[in-house]
Image (cartoon, grey):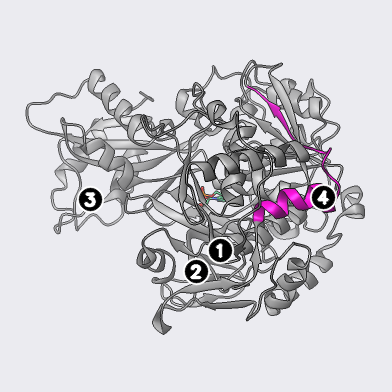
């Protein structure tokens, strides 16, 4: 299907914010427990949540976590029994090598077990669990009043029809299918149909004239029964492209069996899912968050979810809360950037809606600043909803560090503790594990079922990116601090990646889009703090001879980046840089540029700068306002 493209949820900031209104940042007390000696404050799980929770106490969490890490085969083996397997795993439940010095990196969970993820999330729910009439998705369009809903039975029928369409097109197991659709139920149908016939889905943002086909024309004649393709647990399920620090996007490959177990289990425990819940994850399905927590995780649990096509500020800034009330949403999951955006409009657009149904709130995508956490907790959650700050990555498939709503005392800004099966460590630059209070590289010591298996078509890149720096560990690329209570605090990326509104972008990717313009000889991009987006892009461009820097050129460059990468990458600042600070070997010193962008003259050691005069020039010509 090729509908008109509306701005997506996460692209909002890139389009410019509505006028700023009153800001509310006062802090709540709630069940706050002020720690002694200046410790970060913590909030205990509300007793009413703990009472009915799957994991009702910190002690129970610790017992389960210890078992999951010490006996991963037994722990995940028990969970696997809850799924349908045509053939059980005939050999070892888990085999892996995380150490590049010992040979090829590989991870295999349940290799040889035969299943189908679509069968598990649909047929089994309809036939075995008798959930056919249960609503799978309430769909809410951008225009209020534009709504529809789809039950598990209806979803199964449509998925079978579309599977038949795909098979008729000659698509077979192992083929790759690119899908281009907005946030509508048909997107979920298309993903699941691929999974049903064993084809890999890959969600893209551009339409390919001449190759792509129209949905309604294909569905008209399709039969509504379709035998699933039975797949090995280690067969690939999908490819999702994510920014790479060298500029070339990486195709992250996830597999059928391990991903299914991991997203189903994280969904159940992290959102403390119960049958009567109405779950709402605002993420775009084209993201990993949408794959795992709009499509596969909720459906694997037989959950009812809201699928929202629109944006949080249309027709007004209370839209999210009116939807919460309309569908009686119990668990709500969004990104810090959306929270910061809405905070700007004060409490009233939130509090004018009841929100009485809400029980658990979640965030994902970037570190949440305590001010935004406190507002989310006090205003949106009326101080009674635990917040699950979930740290994870496209590569991890599902949550890695996160509180559990009934068990974990929360600290604003901390993703708290590891999920089941996750063994984090903090390393110093020499690769030594640091104990107790520490700060360094966040790594994981052993595989969990949802870990990516390779970079599509480039296994070497997989090994280099995640396993070379510290042999024996999966390296996240994030910095992390552990406090005296053992809480983990993500401090941000340590490579050349930017996190704009929870979207990872590589500086190299943006730089190459800039130099593709005929006027640009060289470009350097650095991150700059932004009140809503977290980080925004500050670009330095050196022009080719004969070109002048002008507002027209800045507009052209922005347009170029929007077209090549997407609206999320639109720079806020572009500065003319006749020269860039470089080392004598010609390396651009981004560390210095970051300081210039922030007008911070404390540059540290600049003895390696080849031509120091460029620095003072750049300081005196800084961009002072967002362009
Ligand atoms: C960042 C999104 C702090 C982190 C699921 C990570 C976070 C990157 C959090 C992955 C969080 C995600 N706290 N930082 N709760 N969640 N990040 O692949 O830098 O789009 O490496 O996956 O986002 O982004 P990705």
| Disc 4 Cβ-to-ligand 1 distance below 8 Å | no
| Disc 1 Cβ-to-ligand 1 distance below 8 Å | no
Kindly give the residue lying farthest to the left in the view shown.
Answer: 546
Residue hosting label 3 = 588
Q: Answer with left or right where residue 356 lies relative to residue 394.
A: right
- Give the percent coordinates (x, y) of residue 384: 84, 41
**Residue found 77% across the figure and 68% down from its top:** 81
Earlier-in-chain disc, 2 versus 4:
4
Residue hosting label 1 = 451
- Find out whether residue 120 is within the magenta segment: yes
Residue 15 tag number: none
Q: How much space separates mark 4 and mark 3, taking CA atoms?
A: 61 Å
Relative to 17, residue 469 above or below:
below
- Give the percent coordinates (x, y) of residue 56: 86, 59
Residue 474 tag number: 2
| Disc 3 Cβ-to-ligand 1 distance below 8 Å | no
Earlier-in-chain disc, 2 versus 1:
1
Q: Secondary structure at mark 4?
A: helix
| Nearer to us: label 2 or label 1 | 1
**Residue found 63% across the figure and 20% down from its top:** 22
| Disc 2 Cβ-to-ligand 1 distance below 8 Å | no
Q: Secondary structure at mark 2?
A: strand
Q: Secondary structure at mark 3?
A: loop
Earlier-in-chain disc, 1 versus 3:
1
Residue 127 tag number: 4
Q: How much space separates mark 3 and mark 2, taking CA atoms?
A: 29 Å
Q: How much space separates mark 1 and mark 3, taking CA atoms?
A: 34 Å
Q: Answer with left or right where residue 8 lies relative to residue 539.
A: right
Q: Where are the magenta residues, as a range? A: 117-141
């Amino acid at each position: 299907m090729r509908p008109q493209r509306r701005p997506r949820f996460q692209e909002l900031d890139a389009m410019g914010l509505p006028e700023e209104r009153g800001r509310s940042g006062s802090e709540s007390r709630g069940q706050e427990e002020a720690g002694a000696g200046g410790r970060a404050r913590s909030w205990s799980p509300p007793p009413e949540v703990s009472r009915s929770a799957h994991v009702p106490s910190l002690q129970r969490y610790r017992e389960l976590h210890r078992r999951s890490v010490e006996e991963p085969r037994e722990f995940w083996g028990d969970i696997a029994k809850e799924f349908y397997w045509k053939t059980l795993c005939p050999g070892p439940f888990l085999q892996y090598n995380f150490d590049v010095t010992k040979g090829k990196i590989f991870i295999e969970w349940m290799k040889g077990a035969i299943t189908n993820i679509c069968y598990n999330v649909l047929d089994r729910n309809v036939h075995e669990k008798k959930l056919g009439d249960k609503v799978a998705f309430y769909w809410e369009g951008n225009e209020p009043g534009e709504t529809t809903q789809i039950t598990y039975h209806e979803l199964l029928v449509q998925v079978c029809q579309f599977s038949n369409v795909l098979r008729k097109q000659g698509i077979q197991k192992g083929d790759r299918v690119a899908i281009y659709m907005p946030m509508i139920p048909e997107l979920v149908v298309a993903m699941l149909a691929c999974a049903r016939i064993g084809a890999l889905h890959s969600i893209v943002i551009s339409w390919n004239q001449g190759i792509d086909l129209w949905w309604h024309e294909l569905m008209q004649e399709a039969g509504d029964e379709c035998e699933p393709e039975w797949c090995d647990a280690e067969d690939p399920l999908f490819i999702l492209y994510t920014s790479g620090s060298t500029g070339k996007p990486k195709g992250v490959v996830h597999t059928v069996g391990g991903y299914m177990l991991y997203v189903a289990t994280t969904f159940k425990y992290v959102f403390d899912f119960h049958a009567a819940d109405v779950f709402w994850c605002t993420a775009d399905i084209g993201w990993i968050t949408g794959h795992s927590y709009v499509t596969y995780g909720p459906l694997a649990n037989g959950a009812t979810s809201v699928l929202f096509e629109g944006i949080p500020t249309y027709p007004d800034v209370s839209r999210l809360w009116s939807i919460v009330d309309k569908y009686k949403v119990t668990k709500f999951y969004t990104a810090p950037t959306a929270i910061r955006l809405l905070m700007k409009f004060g409490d009233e657009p939130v509090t004018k809606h009841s929100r009485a149904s809400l029980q658990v709130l979640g965030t994902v995508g970037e570190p949440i600043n305590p001010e935004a956490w406190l507002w989310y907790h006090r205003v949106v959650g009326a101080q009674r909803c635990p917040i699950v700050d979930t740290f994870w990555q496209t590569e991890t498939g599902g949550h890695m560090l996160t509180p559990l709503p009934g068990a974990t005392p929360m600290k604003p800004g901390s993703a708290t503790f590891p999920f089941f099966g996750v063994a984090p460590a903090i390393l110093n630059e020499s690769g030594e594990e640091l104990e107790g209070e520490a700060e360094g590289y966040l790594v994981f010591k052993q595989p969990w079922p949802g870990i990516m298996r390779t970079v599509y078509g480039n296994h070497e890149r997989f090994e280099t990116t995640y396993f070379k720096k510290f042999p024996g560990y999966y390296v996240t690329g994030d910095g992390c601090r552990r406090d005296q209570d053992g809480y983990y605090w993500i401090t941000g990326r340590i490579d050349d990646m930017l996190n704009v509104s929870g979207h990872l972008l590589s500086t190299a990717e943006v730089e190459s889009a800039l130099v593709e313009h005929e006027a640009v000889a060289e470009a350097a991009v650095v991150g700059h703090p932004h009140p809503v987006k977290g980080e925004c892009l500050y670009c330095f461009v050196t022009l080719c001879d004969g070109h002048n820097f002008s507002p027209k050129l800045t507009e052209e460059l922005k347009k170029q980046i929007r077209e090549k990468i997407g609206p999320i990458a639109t720079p806020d600042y572009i500065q003319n840089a006749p020269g860039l600070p470089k080392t004598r070997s010609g390396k651009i010193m981004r560390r210095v540029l970051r300081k210039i962008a922030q007008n911070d003259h404390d540059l540290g050691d600049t003895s390696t700068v080849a031509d120091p005069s460029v620095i003072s020039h750049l300081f005196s010509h800084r961009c002072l306002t967002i362009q």
